[in-house]
Image: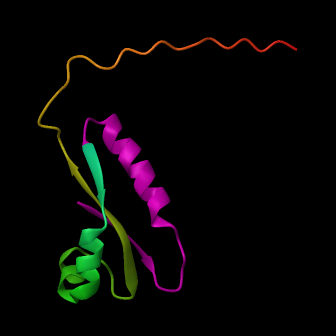
Amino acid sequence: MLVFHHPMEDSVDCYLAASFASIAAESVGLGACMNGMLVAAMQQDTALKVRWGVPKGNIGQCSMILGYPAVKYLNSIRRRFFSVDCRS
């Protein structure tokens, strides 16, 4: 699990970092799922912040669960891409 957090005085959008982490996870064969419930639980119970390594004074914005998929699909959707020819 990854927890994306930021300092209270900084308004960083952690969802952008989480999106790139999701793409990176996919590139190495991991599945990724964003989860807001874990951050909500962390806001209610400060012991979870300590357990998950969020520094004091930081706010959790989103979390992501990572894992290897249990199923590997052999066939994917077959798509026909159209060609675009731009001439001036």
Q: Compared with residue 13, is residue 42 higher up or lower down, i.e. above or below? A: below
Name the one closer to the observer, 80 or 50.
80
Residues drawn in magenta: 1-30
Q: Compared with residue 36, is residue 34 higher up or lower down, i.e. above or below? A: above
Q: Compared with residue 83, is residue 7 higher up or lower down, i.e. above or below? A: below
On whether residue 8 falls in the magenta region, the answer is: yes
The spot of residue 63 in percent (x, y) is 31, 64
In the orientation shown, which residue stands out farthest toward the left? 70
Residue occupying image coordinates x 20% and y 87%: 45
Q: The N terminus lies in which quarter of the figure?
A: bottom left
The spot of residue 73 in percent (x, y) is 20, 24
Name the one closer to the observer, 81 or 4.
81
The spot of residue 57 in percent (x, y) is 39, 88
Residue occupying image coordinates x 33% and y 87%: 56
Name the one closer to the observer, 48 or 37.
37
On whether residue 69 falls in the magenta region, the answer is: no
Residue occupying image coordinates x 19% and y 80%: 48
Quadrant housing residue 11: bottom right
Snapshot colouring:
rainbow
Residue occupying image coordinates x 46% and y 81%: 7
Quadrant housing residue 78: top left
In this rendering, the count of numbered labels is 0
- In the image, taking residue 61 as reference, residue 73 lies left or right, namely left
